[in-house]
Amino acid sequence: MQTTTIACVLAGFVFAGVAADASADAPLRVAATVGMVADIVREVGGERVAVTQLIGSGVDPHLYKPGRGDVNHLLAAQVIFYSGMKLEGKMTDTFARMARAGREVHAVTEALTSEYALRNPDDPQHADPHVWMDVRGWMKAVDVVASVLARVDAAHEEAYRARAGAYLKRLAALDEYVRTVTASIPEDARVLITAHDAFHYFGRAYGLEVMGIQGISTESEAGLERINRLVDLLVERRIPAIFVETSVSDRNVRALIEGARARGHEVRIGGELFSDAMGSEGTYEGTYIGMIDHNATVIARALGGTAPERGFQNRLRGAP
């Protein structure tokens, strides 16, 4: 089924005013797009929610095209959460139409102010969507999810608020860990070069200069001029490592390494980072905390900083 057809099916459904109710004792049926969003819902909702995640680990949400199964999940959901800021591409327009038709559809980034949001240089009318890279910014998304669930399922508001509060404390501890390990990176090595521009919120929050080979969206192409400029930077500043991403091809990263080697500077791959998708389901890295713990630990160690090999909760499988 084509994406346009799916959008029409969903639009027809919501404009008909159809919505499924559940008994008071049944868990809320919640659909979430990416893993970072689904993880918040699971943490805040606990046993009161049954979460269906549409976009799996290792899948690029910028390029994702929903299928027939996604339609069924969206139609059955009582609440739908998505990240927003155009992360989900053309699906965003469908979600907006569903919300206007009265469905419980919410972007978890809706509470962020325009002053907070970074601009998308590829599309200046829209913001950079990769907010989860700044833990303090992503904590605002937890508040959005908690408020929606508490309103929709008011009988269990106290439980949602309590779980959200406990989760926010864990995120505050994670944020402090990231600040500590990134601060240990030597000042002249605080340059983070990755496959695409997913880490600018991370750089702003934790004091790193960030450059991506591709733009904000993985649909943008990396031009030869940009690759040559990054090779110049690697050589001139003697940057020791650059990073690949789990949901993006490493082809351009390896082109940078070859370009630097041709000019006498050896650059290594510092590790594989989670950018637009978390780790495999059921693993620690398949949670938001594990994802950020992994990224911060790998980045700090690869760029000459100090971080425990198994991360801030001693649960990583082992960073390089």
Image: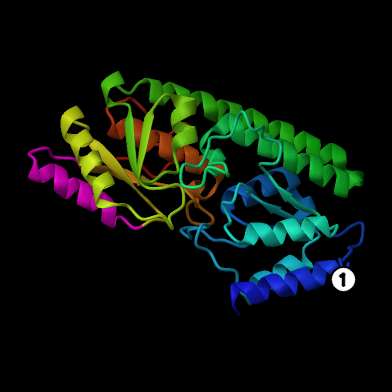
**Residue 52 shown left or right of residue 26 in the figure:** left
Question: Which of the image's four quarters has the N terminus?
Answer: bottom right
> In the rendered picture of this protein, how many numbered marks are placed on residues?
1
Part of the protein shown in magenta:
249-268
- Residue that badge 1 annotates: 16
Q: Nearer the viewer, residue 243 or 287?
A: 243
Instruction: Residue 18 in the image: state x and y as whole percent.
Output: 87, 69
Residue type at the position of mark 1: Ala
Say left or right for 299 vs 23: left
Q: Taken as a whole, is the magenta stretch helix, strand or loop?
A: helix
| Quarter residue 188 falls in | top left
**Residue 309 visible (yes or no):** no
Front residue (pair 96, 58)? 96
Quadrant the C terminus occupies:
top left
Q: Residue at x 51, y 37 (%)?
A: 133
Q: Tell me which corner region of the image, top left, top right, bottom left or bottom right, holds residue 11.
A: bottom right
Task: Identify which residue is drawn at 57% across, 41% down.
Answer: 127
The percent coordinates of residue 200 (x first, y second) are: 45, 35
In the image, is residue 55 above or below residue 211?
below
Q: Residue at x 73, y 31 (%)?
A: 165
